[in-house]
Image: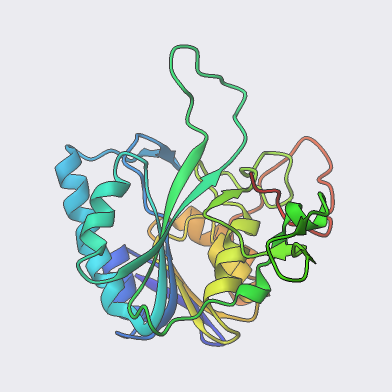
């Protein structure tokens, strides 16, 4: 195991269990975002992730979930992603120790390959859970989105004693639309399940404050850490694959570890510069 520390934020090259134990004190993580391998046969840097049985996979998940719960601050929040067929089992297990506030659907556009004989998968589930349902961080004002009833349709609420226009903004519901990361996007890295920065931006803005500790036990391309750093949060990202650790070091600007950096993916086009993000349209 190797830990790269920069101003209190850490990138950890190691197994999820040893990495969490070595770098995150119990009760210290204000926000934990967990995006583990889904056990659906995806290939990560030449290695196929597939357990011998569903039960073996779930038992492994329960082990690191219990560690994450122990690392979570008493007023902390956890967001958990998983394959649709596995999330009900993890939901039930997590309810033994946390309160699940929301079951979120991340909806995205379809890929070039279209299903022909079944309904294609166009979403991934996210659980939002807290240790104490009476005391947790949720900064609604930082994640407001357009309310089309007021902002676009300009409707009036005549049920009130004084007719009042509907609000132009609202807290997002539990169906979120963000495009998946595509090859032509500036943030693209060579990884089969990279999550988009706007998705993590909403989660981190809503459920943490500046200088809070944000933890990602399966960091992958380290999107969580990159966004946390940009939003002035401390972070710990744990990743077992050295190539992806190199991606993380590059993305968070860990210049003292140049020999460990993974070069950015080669592209056959000139990447467009990021433009100011608009709030995603919900449906």
Q: Looking at the picture, how far across and down is residue 75, in whole percent?
A: 39, 84
Query: Can you tell which quarter of the image residue 225 is in?
Result: bottom right
Residue 134 or 114: which is nearer the viewer? 134
* Residue 111 appears anywhere in the view: yes
Q: Looking at the picture, how far across and down is residue 122, in whole percent?
A: 52, 34
Counting labels gives: 0
| Quadrant containing the C terminus in the rendered view | top right
Picture residue at 56% right of the left edge, 56% below the top: 173
Q: Looking at the picture, how far across and down is residue 68, in whole percent?
A: 30, 71
The colour scheme used here is rainbow
| Quadrant containing the N terminus in the rendered view | bottom left
Q: Which residue of the protein is positioned furthest toward the front in this rendering?
A: 161
Picture residue at 40% right of the left edge, 79% below the top: 76
Q: Is residue 111 above or below residue 28?
A: above
Q: Is residue 268 above or below residue 101?
A: above
Residue 249 or 165: which is nearer the viewer? 165
Query: Can you tell which quarter of the image residue 201 is in?
Result: bottom right
Query: Can you tell which quarter of the image residue 14 is in?
Result: bottom left
Picture residue at 39% right of the left edge, 72% below the top: 2
Picture residue at 50% right of the left edge, 18% below the top: 115
* Residue 11 appears anywhere in the view: no
Residue 115 or 228: which is nearer the viewer? 115
Query: In the picture provided, is 269 more to the left or to the right than 113?
Result: right
Q: Looking at the picture, how far across and down is residue 30, in whole percent?
A: 44, 81
Query: In the picture provided, is 198 more to the left or to the right than 114?
Result: right
């Amino acid at each position: 195991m190797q830990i790269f520390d920069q101003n209190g934020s850490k990138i950890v090259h190691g197994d999820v269990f040893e990495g969490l134990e070595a770098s995150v004190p119990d009760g210290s993580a204000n926000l934990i975002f967990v995006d583990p391998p889904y056990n659906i046969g995806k290939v990560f840097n030449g290695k196929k992730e597939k357990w011998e049985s569903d039960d073996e996979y779930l038992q492994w998940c329960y082990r690191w979930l219990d560690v994450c719960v122990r690392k979570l601050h008493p007023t902390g929040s956890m967001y958990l992603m998983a394959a649709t067929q596995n999330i009900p089992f993890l939901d039930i297990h997590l309810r033994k120790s946390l309160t699940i506030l929301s079951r979120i659907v991340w909806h995205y556009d379809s890929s070039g390959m279209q299903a022909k004989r079944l309904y294609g998968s166009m979403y991934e589930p996210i659980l939002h859970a807290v240790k104490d349902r009476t005391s947790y961080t949720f900064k609604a004002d930082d994640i407001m989105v357009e309310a089309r009833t007021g902002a676009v349709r300009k409707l009036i609420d005549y049920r009130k004693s004084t007719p009042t226009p509907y609000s132009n903004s609202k807290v997002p519901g539990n169906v979120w639309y963000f495009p998946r990361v595509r090859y032509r996007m500036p943030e693209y890295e060579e990884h089969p399940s990279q999550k988009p920065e706007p998705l993590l931006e909403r989660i981190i803005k809503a459920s943490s404050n500046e200088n809070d500790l944000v933890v990602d036990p399966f960091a992958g391309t380290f999107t969580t850490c990159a966004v946390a750093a940009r939003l002035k949060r401390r972070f710990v990202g744990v990743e077992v694959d050295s190539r992806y650790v190199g991606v993380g070091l590059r993305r968070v600007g860990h210049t003292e570890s140049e020999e460990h950096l993974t070069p950015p993916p080669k592209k056959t086009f000139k990447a467009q510069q990021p433009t100011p993000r608009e709030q995603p349209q919900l449906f």
